[in-house]
Amino acid sequence: MRKAAFLARRLTPAGCIIAGTKLAAHREALRSRKTKLAPKVDAAVQSVIARTEAVEALGSTDATMTEIDRGADRCISAFGAQLDGIERAFDHDDILPVGHGQAARRADAALVRSEVLSSGTGFVKLVYSQQWVRMNAMVKALDGKDVKAAVERLGLGAEVDRLRRWTALYGQKLGVTEAKGADPAIKAVEAWHEAYGTLMVQVHAEYDDDTDETHALLRDRLLSPYEDAAEEERRAERARAASARKKNEPEPIV
């Protein structure tokens, strides 16, 4: 199992740099206080710092993958929302009964969701390599005979075609669906997450005593840089979503 899987979410390249830089500062502060880290933990910290420098050195060359990732995420989330909307449009049938055709449409949406997005769309927050695995599985599920028929009846063929194209582009950029190697910037970001995931595992293995103040301090100093960066990106996403909702609100009638 890849250690990056222990991280709650994927950071942007900028987030990786912020977290890695803060981790390096915390390490220096601990060293100035003569706090000696366990060898495996210290090695993991040094690995994250080195990976941070690699991400920083590549600068903006990850922009193309970032844009592809965002576009794919929006398409996947929109498809999930469409299925959800169809199902919700025909719920509460205990109050207002639905006709045969309406029930069939709701059943088709539920079928596609259960086969294609059974765990929701949260996987768009995974690191690129793990998201690709889930996207590839999504496309394979769309190839199922019953799913294809349901998609056709729902009239979602255009959206499914878009999902397939985003998945193909995503894989090509990662270098997993064609011979060329992956973008160095993508590799650097993936390696950074793997390094920080390894650090997280080592920190919890060495400093898991909640009654020991030193253990608690070390966990905070070594893991908070990532956690703070992840929370900052969550806040930024919420702010962007709130701004988008506000823009889409109809003008008040006066």
Image (cartoon, rainbow, N blue to C red):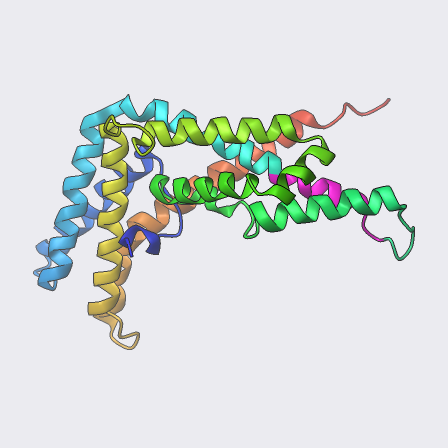
Relative side of 147 to 93, left or right: left
Image point 82% across, 47% down: which residue?
103
The answer to whether residue 221 of the structure is visible from this angle is no
Left or right: 155, with 203 as reference point:
right
- Seen from the viewer's position, the closer of residues 140 and 33 is 140
* Residue 81 within the magenta-colored segment of the rendering: yes
- Farthest residue, direction bottom: 211
Point 34% across, 27% down: residue = 173
Q: Quadrant of residue 214?
A: bottom left
Q: What's drawn in magenta, residue-wise?
A: 80-92
Q: Quadrant of residue 21?
A: top left
At 91% across and 51% down in the image, what residue appears? 97
The extreme front residue here reads: 145
Number of numbered callouts drawn: 0
The quadrant of the picture occupied by the C terminus is top right
* 50 lies above or below 57: below
Residue 100, horizontal then vertical, whole percent: 88, 46
Which SS type dominates the magenta stretch? helix
| Residue 208: quarter of image | bottom left
Q: Position of residue 117 (x, y in %)?
A: 56, 47
Q: Quadrant of the N terminus?
A: bottom left
**Can residue 206 be seen from the camera position used here?**
yes
Horizontal relation, residue 78 to residue 17: left or right: right
**Residue 28 rendering spot, x and y as whole percentages:** 13, 49
**61 to 10, vertically: above or below:** above
Q: Position of residue 102 (x, y in %)?
A: 84, 43
